[in-house]
Image (tube, grey):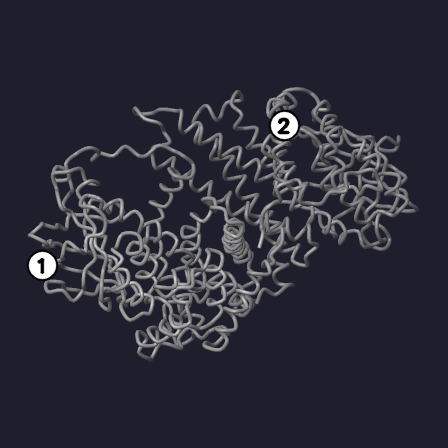
Amino acid sequence: MDFKDTPEQAKFRKTCRDWLEKNAKLKTGFEKNEFANIDFLQVAKEWQKKKYDAGWAMLHWPKEFGGIGASAIERIIWAEEESKFNVPKGIFEIGLGMAGPVMMEYATEEQKARYLPAMAEGKEIWCQLFSEPSAGSDVAGLRSKAVKDGDNWIINGQKVWTSGAHFSDYGILVVRHDPNLEKHKGMTFFFLDMKSPGVEVKPIKQITGGSSFNEVYFTDVVVPDSQRLGEVGDGWKVAITTLMNERLAVGDANGADVEDAFRWAKKQDDSGEPLINNKSVRSSIADWYCEANGLKNTKLRTMSALSRGETPGPEASITKIVSANKLQNIGAFGMDSLDMAGMLKTDDPEIQSFQNAWLGAPGLRIAGGTDEILKNIIAERVLGLPQDARADKGMPYKDIPSGNS
Amino acid sequence: MNLDFSEDQKFLQSEAKKFLEKEESVKRSRKVLEGTGSFDNDLWQKIIELGWTGIRIPEEYEGLGLGHLELCVIAEELGRHLAPVPFSSSVYLFTEAVIKYGSEELKKEILPKLVTGEVVGTIAVTEDFLAPTNNNIKTEVSNDLISGTKIAVPDCEAATHSIIVCKSSRGIDLRLVDLSCKEVSINQVENIDGSRGHYSLEMKQVPSALIGDEGNGWILYESIINQGAVLFSFEQIGGSQAALDMAVNYANERYAFGKPIGSYQGIKHKLADMYVALTLAKSNSYYAAWALSSESSDLPVAAATARVSATKAYELCSKENIQTHGGNGYTWEYDCHLFYKRSKLLSLNIGSLANWKEKLVSNLEQSNIN
């Protein structure tokens, strides 16, 4: 056991680090609002372009699409080093993490040459159009439809929870081409221009008051058959590729963590004593420290396997369940520690970080697979328990009961 | 980057697993529980023959001279198979204490005998129905003679020697006593997990030898159980994995309402929670193993983190294993209770969950994670 890089890894880490030091600022602590009053999208695009020009944007991609053909472990080393710097986050992750791999696997060579470099460069932003009002955890229950019309398909229906649709140029889309088939068999996968006539994007106001995702309506939207990814009827298989990538992309929750709770507890007053002297607070901090480090060390085990060129075990599947719940608990702890004043909005960045954690965590426990769906996945795919009986098994999609949604 | 055991260590682990399966260690544990003794001497002798009691003892003292990582993988298998032997008391605590704090003379005398099993050790600290601290130890030493009463001393049926945590004129001392001397009276006390025994020691003017510096014993004791906590954690994750495996098997085989109970989300989510707790504990134990084997200054925090996670994991896995088995799980006949009881024994033997959480947070305060 050791935590040393191999000589090659150390050399690679230094190359990452040297470039980052020249082009970005190291994090120092509470600079979370540095990007608050500027055109964030513009700043994010400029950063992405800088990375692209140096080969860091999608480093594991081949050179022709703007990468440097990096290995899995090199990708992690880059991400580790980049995370130490204060750089804009949250605009390109879905496009690059989910649309990118699907295009790489299913698009034609011409399409890849046309779209992938522009995606990596940040010139064009992509979103993912999967969930629907009546198809959330059971995303295969989607009903937006595609009807063949010569060399085109005509799309009608509605998607929901589409992150970044309001600033996206393209989207990947799964729709139903035949409601007479079983639900998993009647779907087909496309990509489309978000500026196509008939596409309407409406932001959804979240419980935070902000809007990072949208409803997207399709009214007679024309998509050329050449933009189909995979065969007609392979929509679910293609979607699964994306969902697998989503599980890797939506991992550790950002926001207040045990270090923040600990620092806060040492300075916050609790009836004339530091809050850290309170036994129940000490017990909670111990629990969060064990969870935070359990995740950190789990990641190190995953990296150890990758570093040896092996496929990691299933242990990383616990990440989102643990981190989103920890975030929610730490947010609540910070607010509770202020008693009645915990409800008040303030300019204090530490208090804000607890309130943001508490308001943001419910979304994280749902996005990219709810806690419950993730537990089903652990039970079925890791522990090998049988699938739940499915009431819609073998039924044509059109005959499946769908309640009043 | 390598937070994993080496191929040799994994091989040692798989050999240990095969051995304990072949010896039907879990069945032996039940036998001890149902009998009058408090360990399985036949299994213990076989373990000694395999050299496991001397894993960490340097070759100059006739041990195998291997590292802590080898001991960690053995500990995980002993936990998985509920081995009813005094290994944790004698190897994780007593032997480590002698290696770390014993005089050269003592090492020469005792370490080779720990390898051969001629000497088996334990540590006696608790005196009352509360957590021992450096302020509540009443057993006293004067002119090398110890008097006082210890309760809840693990594994004394097998032990020939014990380290006694006692009060001297200069503070707390660690002192070695020979349990065969006539001034010590040893009595078995009934405990909750009869597959590993607890004893009381009554000492009247018992001759003893100092281990480590006089008056500094509490710090040494803390350091011994910090090391021991890493090894206990591995025993605990081994037990957690066995309890989870048992629950998964039962959930696959047991039918209710026409299908396996493992297909219901009420059971699935319970088992997924067990997997999550176990994975956190395992990863934290791996890190603590690294900290122990590399003598990192992070050991006190790493050991407490592993210990808290592993205690939580084993308690969750063993109690929810009973729950998954329904009424069968509550019977004497099914093995579920063996894991439930062992999880509690391992969680209390070097101090409770609450105490380890407190140790973790006070170590964080000292190391100042910010």
The local crowd at label 1, few if under 14, some if 14 to 19, many if 20 or more residues have their Cα within 10 Å, is: some
Residue B292 in the image, given as x and y percentages of width and height: 68, 51
Instruction: Answer above or below: position of B109 versus A238.
Output: above
- Residue A239 can be seen in this image: yes
The three-letter code of the residue at mark 2 reads Leu
Mark 1 sits on what residue?
A219
Residues B31 and A309: in front is A309
Mark 2 sits on what residue?
B20
Residue A342 in the image, given as x and y percentages of width and height: 40, 67
Numbered-mark total: 2
Q: Quadrant of residue B350?
A: top right
Residue A355 falls left or right of residue B110: left
Instruction: Answer above or below: position of A328 versus B109.
Output: below
* Residue farthest along the bottom direction in this orientation: A38
Q: Which residue is located at x 93 percent, y 46 percent? A: B143
Residue B208 in the image, given as x and y percentages of width and height: 88, 41
